[in-house]
Amino acid sequence: MLHIFFTRHGQTVWNVENKICGATDIELTALGHEQAIQLGKKIINDDIKIDEILYSPLIRAAETARHISETTGIPMREEPRLKEQNFGKYEGTARDGLVFQKAKSDFINSYKGGETMLHLAQRIYNLLDDLKQEDKTYLLVAHNGISRVVNSYFHNMSNEEYAAFGIKNCEIVRYDF
């Protein structure tokens, strides 16, 4: 059975400060770098077979992928479709802000200059459809918003479940096509 693996980038300062990163290019913290190295070691220790790492062009995901690749020897390449959703006017604001939580439940909201959930889903679903056709196992290194869309591709979710879904920094999840 074909499958992929997904991980969220390592910790950033804005993760610590409970701010929405979105498409803003935020670097990893020292802990974030260490989390990525530890994930690479976990992939080796758990004998997880991955042919290639695809990563978001944002620095936090690129650096996470670099550490994993250097630790494991797995080749990596940038995949622009994995870039995090642009949350427009909400970038840099509190992740748990009530106004943002309400806005996030409207899937056609572009957040005044951002990207709608539907547009995000289209590009991630298209990527997954493309990967499903290949005879390779990928590790996707991206973002929490992308993790929601990937999860929704493989599992039915209510709007509330979708909005609440997330994974921890450098957590690895397997999905079977």
Image (cartoon, rainbow, N blue to C red):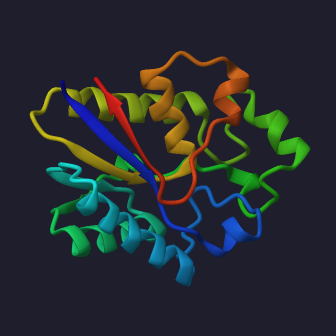
Q: Is residue 169 above or below residue 119?
A: below
Q: Is residue 72 above or below residue 79?
A: below
Residue at 40 percent of width and 70 percent of height: 38
Residue at 30 percent of width and 52 percent of height: 79
Quadrant the N terminus occupies: top left
Residue at 82 percent of width and 58 percent of height: 94
Residue 46 appears in the figure = yes
Residue at 48 percent of width and 31 percent of height: 151
Tell me residue 153's x, y (percent): 44, 24
Q: Residue furthest bottom?
A: 30
Residue 107 appears in the figure = no
Tell me residue 162's x, y (percent): 64, 28
Q: Is residue 19 left or right of residue 25?
A: right
Q: Nearer the viewer, residue 68 or 22?
A: 68
Tell me residue 5's x, y (percent): 33, 43
Q: Is residue 108 left or right of residue 102?
A: left
Q: Residue furthest left?
A: 135
